[in-house]
Image (spheres, grey):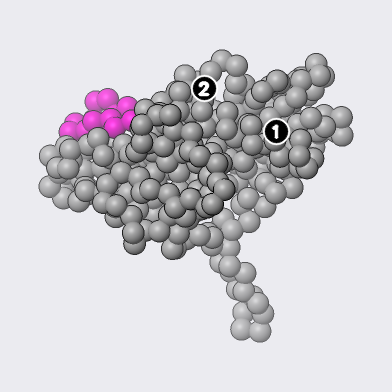
Amino acid sequence: MTGRVIAVGGHESDGAAALTGVLGPEVVRVSGGRELVREVRSARAGGERVCVVPMTLGRDPSLVADTARTLLALDASERAGTVLAEPFATTAHLVGWLRTLATRVPADRALLVTAPSGDPFSDADLFRTARLVRQYGRHRTVEVALLGGDPGLAEGVRRCRALGAPRVVVLPAAWAVPEPTGVPHTEYGGPLLSASAAAGVLASRVREAQDRYERSGDDGVARALAADHDHGHAHSHGPDGHDHDHGHSHGHGHSHSHGHGDSQGAGPDPGGDHHHRTPSHAPRSGAEPPVRHQGAAPDLVPSHRSPR
């Protein structure tokens, strides 16, 4: 890409602080809001094109919508040449990456899927993610720990030990999950993605956003504004009113994945393919093979195949 790539972080990356060391120095890391506006204005003033990437792993749809609203505050000259990419990943990608990590862990260990606490709905998503990791894996015990929330890391380890696991392996389900040094009976099963894998996914997001903008003039902002519409309570207006269901779409059955994987085995590849994942037919370990639509682009580096 010619121009500036800006990665926007939320609670999954401690406001982008945890992206240091994951993304290269050529990528600008911001927490959104004024920082984002300042970086975009600086780049556009120098004539650079800009691509903004929300660095959620699927548990922070509000980050996507908030980023879009921030970009709306720019004037016309600043928005011209500025594109908003699709989120870095979805929860479908996250499940696949965690399952790949789990295949490297001995079967007698417990898995502790760990991430910083967000809002109640983001936290509930983490329990769903852990359940899917357990469903198609070989580990009998898969628990959840919420950093800064309940159950916390110590409680998660205690639960795993109470269920008979000799050791507990922390699987990071976010960017901001430190190694559990000093916590008895625990090991670290991360990182979630290698730096090279994260760079490949990010490059794919940027390329897709730029291609879309050049083809149709779509800067991605309008679509992203509705990213958190289904994130929250279902509420009712009473017996004579109408209901609004603000639950999560794709909660059951198959999920849609657009992915590029890690050449070092990071799991399903979050890039341009449209995959249908059908749990009832998934293999017992590792990431399930995608069923590819005719005409879809090939995976860059699927985790369960040799690199091309």
Q: CA distance from mark 1 to mark 2?
A: 19 Å
- Residue that extends furthest to the bottom in the rendered view of this protein: 240
In the current view of this chain or complex, which residue is farthest to the front? 295
Report x, y in % for residue 7: 60, 29
Q: Range of the magenta residues? A: 177-191
Q: Earlier in the sequence, mark 1 or mark 2?
A: 2
Which one is in front in this view, the residue at disc 1 or the one at disc 2?
1
Residue under numbered circle 2: 23
Nearest the eye: 189 or 271: 271
Three-letter code, disc 1: Gln
Write the residue at 57% across / 32% down: 204
Q: Report if residue 242 lies within the magenta region.
A: no
Relative side of 166 to 263, left or right: left
Label 1 CA crowd tier, 10 Å (few <14, some 14–19, many 20+): many
Residue on which disc 1 sits: 210
Residue at 76% across / 35% down in the picture?
A: 214
Say whether residue 162 is left or right of residue 257.
left
Residue at coordinates 55% horizontally, 30% vertically from top-left?
A: 202
**Image location of residue 161, percent across then percent down:** 16, 44
Q: What is the x, y in percent for residue 232? A: 56, 58
Residue type at mark 2 is: Leu
